[in-house]
Amino acid sequence: MAEVHIIGQILKAVDFAEPHLYCKWSVQSGNAWRLVQGEVQGQTHVSSHRLENSSDFAQPLDIHLSTAAVQGWPRLLVEVFAVNILQQSWPVGYGFAHIPASPGGHRLEINTWKVAPCGWWESVRERFGGGGAALSKTDLLYSGVERYKLQTRSSGKIIVDLNLIFRKFEDYGVEFK
């Protein structure tokens, strides 16, 4: 079977309005893909920015996948949460990016969005620590089937550095340039 090694780290979150952030992440792929080694989901620590508009995570990624088909190429999903002084958390950004289909080093900037408040009370609650609306199903992140119904606005970015190693794809007639 062909293999993909994903080695890297979730570096940081930039341009978010909220000061204390953490990130939940997962790697999702099609049915032909199998996890050989590593973790396909996780969570960073809470990071705060004082002087800069960024939160450093340095969350390592080390995932080894195998596949017999390129359909359902892996993608990295991120959910960014803010935390207040009472240790309450709420979502402030959702985003995803497909893992690049070429070996070597890559820097991904994953633009995120959040659900916009639909009324005056929701705006006040979001602004003063009660949190914003959350998605009930994460498949809304990458499927446009029902996402068009949501009122959203852009959040910040998640910066990810990846090094990709591909093995045995030439046995299946796939060449990467």
Image: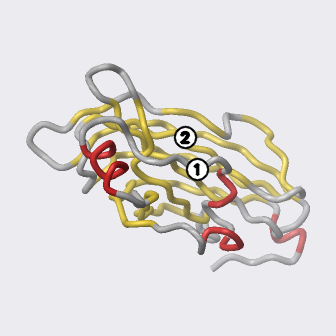
Nearer-the-camera pick, 172 or 12:
12
Left or right: residue 146 compared with residue 18: right
Name the foreground residue: 38 vs 97.
Answer: 97
| Whole-percent x, y for residue 42 in the image | 58, 34
Amino acid residing under circle 2: Leu
Q: Quadrant of residue 114?
A: bottom left
In primary-sequence order, the first of circles 2 and 1 is: 2
Give percent across and percent down for residue 109: 40, 63
Q: Name the residue under label 1.
A: 135
Query: Dot 2 lies on which element?
Result: strand
Image position, residue 69 (x, y; %): 88, 66
User: Which residue is farthest top?
Assistant: 86
Quadrant in the picture for the C terminus: bottom right
Amino acid type for the residue under numbered disc 1: Leu
* Model colouring: secondary structure
Q: Where, by quadrant of the figure, is residue 56 drawn?
A: top left
Residue at image mark 2: 61
Task: Classify 33 as above or below 39.
Answer: below
Check the image and report above or below for 85 versus 156.
above
Identify the residue at horizontal 65%, vertical 60% (top origin): 140
C-alpha separation, residue under disc 2 versus residue under disc 1 = 25 Å
Mark 2: few/some/many CA within 10 Å (<14, 14-19, 20+): many
Q: What element carries label 1?
A: loop
Q: Name the image quarter holding the N terminus.
A: bottom right
